[in-house]
Image: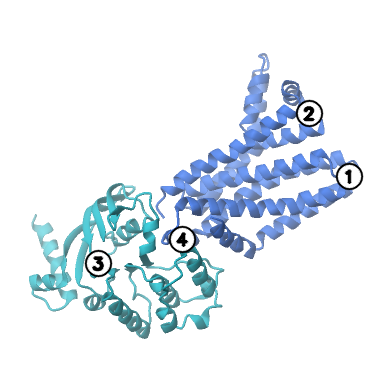
Amino acid sequence: MIKIAKYVMYDILRNRFVMLYTVFLLVVTLSMFSLDNDPGKATLSLLNIILLVVPLVSIIFTTIHFFNSYEFIELLLAQPVNRKTIFFAEFIAIAFALSCAFVIGVALPMLLINFTDSTLYLVLAGLLLTFVFVALAFGASVSTRDKAKAIGVTLLFWFYFTLIYDGLILYVIYSFSDYPLEKVTLALVSLNPIDLARIIILLKLDLSALMGYTGAFYKNFFGSSLGITYSLLLLVAWTLVPLILAMRKFVRKDI
Amino acid sequence: MIKVNDLSKRFGRLEVLKSVSLDFHTSKSYAMIGPNGSGKTTLIKCILGMVLPDSGEIKVADKSIANDWTYRHQIGYMPQIGRYPDQMKIGQLFEMIRDLRGDASNLDEELIKEFRLNQMKDKRLHTLSGGTRQKVSAALAFLFNPRILILDEPTAGLDPIAVETLKAKILLEKNKERLFLITSHIMSDLDELSSHVIYLEEGKVLFNDSLDLLKEETREVKLGRAIATIMKRNLTQTLTA
């Protein structure tokens, strides 16, 4: 598996996209910290950008890469190689490349400028988000033969989790405001990986009041450390479930 | 060596293979003939495990290939259209496949030499012409001395010299206890290379026997005319039925 992943990595590094992504993250991180003197505020602004950009880049890059490596997959399938091995090698290579970009672009400068606990969690949340959206993009890519359709579906995922889902939650809270909704909103938040990542940082930064009602309740319900562990575990589940579903589909796919 | 048992496959509403049963034996070479879209490539892809059949079973060396991948050590495959990672160089491609297959001893590099692929090993694969790609595919298929060789339209797109080189190679290897499965639309090539003929139409096997018998039955000397006779016979049968 590592052998194949190595060749996929080689292919990814040949195209400059990952390098551009790294530079972009680096510029954003450095500018956030030079614009704002309060590191807490800077981390928060950075968080908002990361929550938008990381899922978008992960999902688009994975889909495009998957379809571009169709020839490679075809070639390997005629050789004595297990399909599962090919699938996981592709996943590992892409997730690793994007994670490297994130670590170099965000984690490294933050470690140099100001290192706190929240830095660590920001990096962790960013990496987990990368995995989640790479896995989701694999799910969409193996389900169709059409590149444009797959990109469309993955973009829909992104819109859904960044914009539509928040709207839906607000709508639910607003229309059922006469009822006790704490546990319901808690469950609803668990269904959105981006919200989970946000919660991790906000709990850590002790800014949960900024999240209003749900945040305060979340903090109250879990306390910081339990809430963070819960969110982290859910993010791992958000990676594994789509990944395994995609793998099962890939194993039965006609190439 | 390869046993195909009651194989069926449909793509959506299109039935590509309709309960195909075939037996392939070592030391023979099979020509698979049929109109475009008759299911030849699909059958090959089923044998390679790239396309999974809806029903039926394929056995290679008495072992079912479902959920197995090790049997592909015994197969060399030359695809109809060789598609390779764009950015890779010819040399890297050969190195990678060698690395992945692991069976590095006993390599057959004759075609690499004959096609002079070593001189172009720094060329990137997306810059190659269709013919050169075919040469790369052919060299890869023969490289590991496989016992089964599946060639999907091997001579299409090759220049006349390369065609002769490849044909000579196939004839040479035929004597070495190998199983050849060749599809082509060039009857004269198949006439030279094969000992058996399988005629496929609309996903059904209509003829499966030795080349000599086919010629005898249709009273023709050339494979092309013999096949044409069979096709005409089928046509009149369906028209009268």
Q: How many marks?
A: 4
Judging depth in this view, the residue of B107 and B148 nearest the camera is B107
Name the residue tied to disc 1: A36
Check disc 4 and give the amino acid type.
Leu
Q: Which residue is mark 2?
A: A208
Given the image, what chain letter belongs to the residue carrying mark 3? B
Q: Mark 1 belongs to which subunit?
A: A
**Looking at the image, is mark 2 or mark 3 nearer the viewer?**
3
Q: Secondary structure at mark 2?
A: helix
View extreme (front): residue: B105
Which of the image's four quarters has the N terminus of chain B? bottom left
Disc 1, SS: loop
Q: Residue at x 90, y 41 (%)?
A: A38
| Amino acid type, mark 2 | Ser
How many angstroms separate mark 2 from mark 4 (CA)? 49 Å
Q: Circle 3 sits on which residue?
A: B26
Residue behind mark 4: A76
